[in-house]
Amino acid sequence: MLEIVPGSHLAVTPYGAWLAVARADDGGPRRRILRSILQETESPLLSVDSAIAWSGETSAEKALEALLSLQDDASLEGWPSPRSAPTGALGSTLPQYLAVLSDSGQALLADHQGFCLAVTGYTAEIGDALAAVGADILSVTERQATPLAQLGAHLLDGWGNVDAAGVSGLSFWPMHVGRTRLVLAVSGRPRFNQRAFAELVWALYTRYGRI
């Protein structure tokens, strides 16, 4: 029987944050756990009852197996004290995280209607254009969900604007937060393996995760 280590507050890592938002489907107990933790405004204290509730499993053993799996692939980490989710209006809170998610310092977050939620490093005109393109990419992703799913190992998470050498200078990354569909546009090389990405997703989940 797996056991809980007392006194651990769980936080979602950058990799875990991407697992939570990259797909719209339920994703099983692992993704349910990540999404449940991200909906909390403070990193929750780990307990057997919480693990069962987060995972949707009926037994403690299965719930803890899912938690252990997330820990093993570095999707979750434990902290001795609680951490708080980012607060404040998204338009003023998110740019600080967006700024470090590309090597050019240029990134934008928009919704499925082409409304820009937050932007950094772009002019207003470029931002509006990228938000519109991102909304169309979300629409294509949704309309073609069935054939895209058949690509299997060839299905990637992002959409790139590439040159003749196959190098992408601009990429679009669909994100699913609750029922809210968003797109993250990044110029240059994405840098999602940072705490800033996890904080951005956490801020979005506390706002949209239960919608």
Image: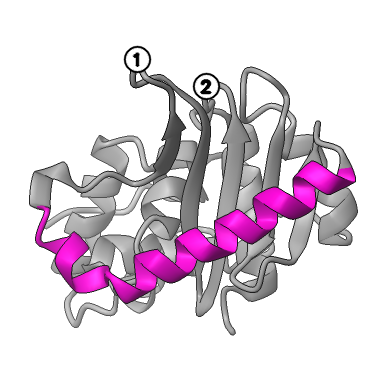
Q: Which mark is residue 189?
A: 2
Question: Can residue 139 be found in the magenta stretch?
Answer: yes
Instruction: Answer above or below: position of 162 versus 75.
Output: above
The CA span between labels 2 and 1 is 15 Å
The residue under the point 36% across, 51% down is 19
The residue under the point 10% across, 52% down is 152
Q: Amino acid at mark 1?
A: Ala
Instruction: Answer above or below: position of 99 versus 132.
Output: above
Q: The magenta stretch spans which residues?
A: 124-151
Q: Position of residue 87 (x, y in %)?
A: 83, 57
Q: Position of residue 47 (x, y in %)?
A: 41, 64
Q: Main secondary structure of the magenta part?
A: helix
Q: Is residue 185 left or right of residue 145?
A: right
| Residue designated by label 1 | 165
Q: Quadrant of residue 55?
A: bottom left
| Secondary structure at numbered mark 1 | loop
